[in-house]
Amino acid sequence: MNGKIHSVETMGLVDGPGIRTVLFFQGCHLRCKYCHNPDTWDLKSGKEMSVHEIIKLLKRYQPYYGKTGGVTCSGGEPLLQIEFLTELFKACKKEDISTCLDTAGYGNGDYAELLKYTDLVLYDVKHYIPEKYRELTGGNFSIPTEFLQAVKESETPLWIRHVVVPNLTDSDEHIRGLRNYIATIPNVEKVELLPYHTLGVSKYEGMGISYPLKKVSPMNKEKIKNLQNMISNTDYNDCERI
């Protein structure tokens, strides 16, 4: 079975625990206003790779993984190639390679089989209010909600990630709402707030696409630090359920 891969990072340090090989899958149905990888949108692009080819690559770097590292499948949206992804994770488990899924949860359903072979999910919360979610991504909030329900049922460990954008998702009120949303998810181990940046703007220019947030400056480092403290110091058992 072959999959469409946009690119490979052999020694990733920020996409899950330890040293990881990061596979960026091709294809995404969302159009997030702050997306910095528009070149991953088209599912028909990318390089075809087989499960065998990828396992061979991963085994080459396996000595560097140690006890905590492994492979992270990111994107794009890996769930759009769920059959290939599931076969890849099955093969990884046979080789004792830790599996991590970096996703916005925007797939086509039927996640139970995949999650049997997934050690960790990095879940990108775009927004927790359905109307705001659609404004920010163009997507339907019920789709990631279905994925999140499957993760809850599988009890797969979760790291939550959330991009903080000036004047969109950077208010104290928004972060308090995010805390309450996270409090409804029982298997969260970590919450990371990611600062909005403009590193992908040149890709839009090269592809002849208008960048939606061209007037928005990168996130202030001190403010993101304060908001992260607000999230990190939360006792989620005491949060209001939404």
Image: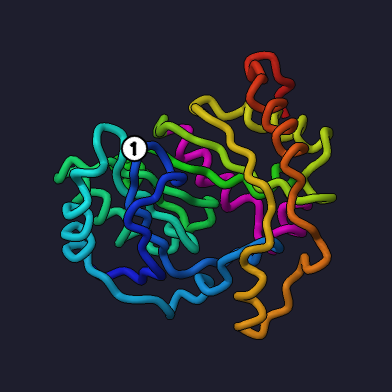
Local SS, label 1: loop
Question: At which x and y percent is residue 98?
Answer: 28, 41
Drawn side of residue 105 relative to residue 88, left or right: right
Exactly how many numbered labels are in the figure? 1
- Predominant secondary structure, magenta span: helix
Q: Quadrant of the N terminus?
A: bottom left
Drawn side of residue 12 relative to residue 54, left or right: right
Drawn side of residue 155 relative to residue 116, left or right: right
Residue at 34% across / 47% down in the picture? 20
Q: Quadrant of the C terminus?
A: top right
Drawn side of residue 93 relative to residue 233, left or right: left
Question: At which x and y percent is residue 102?
Answer: 46, 49
Front residue of 22 and 4: 22
Find disc 1 in the rendering and name its residue.
Answer: 119
Quadrant in which residue 81 is drawn: bottom left
Front residue of 90 and 140: 90
| Extent of the magenta region | 131-153
Vertical position of residue 58 compared to residue 63: above or below:
below
Front residue of 47 and 241: 47
Residue 192 shown in magenta: no
Residue at 32% across / 56% down in the picture? 10
Residue at 64% across / 74% down in the picture? 202
Question: At which x and y percent is residue 161?
Answer: 58, 42
Vertical position of residue 49 compared to residue 87: above or below:
below
